[in-house]
Image: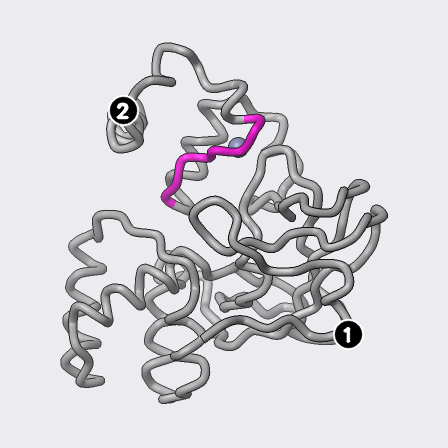
Amino acid sequence: MTVSLPAAYAELVRIERWGEERQLLAAAAIEPGAVLVAEYPIAFVEVQPHEEDDGALLLLESILATQDREAHDRAADLKLGVWTLSGRETERLAHYAAVYRRNPKKLTQLYHRVAANNIRYAQGGVIGYGLWPIVSRSNHSCDPNARLGASEGQPLLELLIATRPIAPGTAICWNYLGDDSFLALDWFARNAQLLKDFRFLCRCSRCEAERPPEIAALPKAQIAAWFQRIG
Ligand SMILES: [Zn+2]
């Protein structure tokens, strides 16, 4: 199933194959401040502060529990991120597979998609985790050209807003950490944070330029292991 963009936004952005995955690209010359995407989630779960660490698991369970076929299919179309699951994750997935009668392998893959694409939402006293499939076709960058913003009067509506002029064909990217102070950190501190919160090493142009030469040649898995050792 492919993700289609609402007609109103198709003039500014499009989703196209870019490298190994489908990516949100500028379809025209874009001015700073332009709203590139306005999207409601296909799935959302509100959490209490003590549940924040389990945001992705709770979001997966909400999709399984509602038996919302469309949310399920669209979640299965999200980009896949894979890492080694924790004991806690493995245990919960086995539990969900039994309760909701799912194929454990397929369920694990769905979880990897949900966990790699969920976005934390905090607005108007509501804190939760959701899936916004068009927004999640834009990658993180430590030198972003857009930012994510909630819409005050419209709960759960996420806006992707250009923060600088963007040339046609350029990938739209934003800072997944939200906070501008993250962008002031050095390569080590940024990637330690990204690995901890989102489980990836950043390959943005800024990170490629700032990555220390002594680890530049190492394979991805070794760099992740190295961060775990020093963390
Ligand atoms: Zn980066």
State the quadrant of the N terminus: bottom left
Q: Name the kind of residue labelled 2 in the image.
A: Trp
Give the spatial CA distance, label 2 vs label 1. Answer: 45 Å
Q: Is residue 174 left or right of residue 81?
A: right
**Is the distance from the Cβ of mark 1 to the nearest ligand 1 atom less than 8 Å?**
no
Residue 79: percent from the left, percent from the top? 42, 58
Q: Is residue 106 magenta?
A: no
Residue drawn at x 55%, y 53% as measured from the top left: 23
State the quadrant of the C terminus: top left
What are the residue bounds of the magenta stretch?
A: 199-206
Q: Earlier in the sequence, mark 2 or mark 1?
A: 1
Q: Is residue 184 above or below residue 58?
A: above
Q: Is residue 202 magenta?
A: yes
The residue sitting at the top extreme is 214
Disc 2 crowd, CA 10 A, few/some/many (<14, 14-19, 20+): few
Q: Is residue 168 left or right of residue 107?
A: right
| Secondary structure mostly seen in the magenta stretch | loop
Q: Quadrant of residue 180?
A: top right
Residue 141: percent from the left, percent from the top? 57, 39
Element assignment for label 1: loop
Q: Quadrant of residue 5?
A: bottom right
Q: Name the kind of residue labelled 1 in the image.
A: Gly
Which residue has dot 2 on it?
A: 226
Q: Is residue 231 left or right of residue 212?
A: left
Given residues 141 and 129, the one toward you in this image is: 141
Given residues 146 and 29, the one toward you in this image is: 29
Residue drawn at x 43%, y 47% as measured from the top left: 20
Which residue has dot 1 on it?
A: 153
Residue 61: percent from the left, percent from the top? 33, 76
Q: Nearer the viewer, mark 2 or mark 1?
A: 2
Q: Is residue 30 above or below residue 193?
A: below
Residue 41: percent from the left, percent from the top? 56, 73
